[in-house]
Amino acid sequence: TSLLPEGADNAREGAIVEIAPARTAMMQRIAEALARRGGAGLFPDYGYEKPAIGDTLQALRAHAYDDVLAHPGEADITAHVDFHALKQAAKSHGLSARTMSQGDFLLGLGLLERAGRLGAGRSHGEQEAIRDAVERLAGPETMGELFRVLAVTPSTVTVPPFTSAH
């Protein structure tokens, strides 16, 4: 029960909680290396900021959702990342661990300015394609909010765009 997230005692019977000790152990090893040797890590993936109750295990096949057990070896099996657990693992080694949405991350790195330069002098169709790509990567209804980026650095180092993020 010590591994269950806050509020799990109020969950309905049959509720699912995903725990990934191998993923946390991997972050422990990475954080130990960063703390010992220096450096920083950026970890983008889709996931959630706080531990939660729910089933995120899913399969993707031919760019569409698939039954997890329907096509073994032919579908990608995945689950959302518990960024809270990864942050705690990094912090246990004295490192700073900050997250933000992929949209905020890319916008903070200058995605709109870069897209504007790419689209300058291009046809209307090419500009539309660039706008669509920006929306897909950074929009709130798309990957911009579903994906998160974790920055792990020494506590004395800040990297843009994480300078004001927590």
Image (spheres, grey):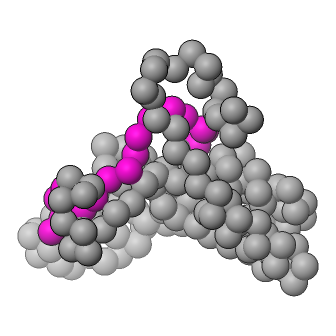
Residue 4 percent location from the top left of the image: 65, 35
- 69 relative to 28, above or below: above
53 part of magenta stretch: yes
Residue located at (52% from left, 54% from top): 81
Does residue 121 appear to the left or right of 87 in the view shown?
Answer: left
Residue 124 percent location from the top left of the image: 10, 68
- 16 relative to 94, above or below: above
Q: Which residues are magenta?
A: 49-66
* 149 or 57: nearer the viewer: 57
Does residue 37 appear to the left or right of 70 in the view shown?
Answer: right
Residue located at (45% from left, 20% from top): 13
Q: For residue 70, what is the image quadrant?
A: bottom left
9 part of magenta stretch: no
Numbered-mark total: 0
Does residue 32 appear to the left or right of 22 in the view shown?
Answer: right
- 35 relative to 68, above or below: below
Question: Visible in this render: residue 162?
Answer: no
Magenta span dominant secondary structure: loop
Does residue 74 appear to the left or right of 91 in the view shown?
Answer: left
Residue located at (69% from left, 32% from top): 1
- 117 relative to 136, above or below: below
Question: Visible in this render: residue 17?
Answer: yes
Residue located at (71% from left, 46% from top): 166
Q: For residue 131, what is the image quadrant?
A: bottom left
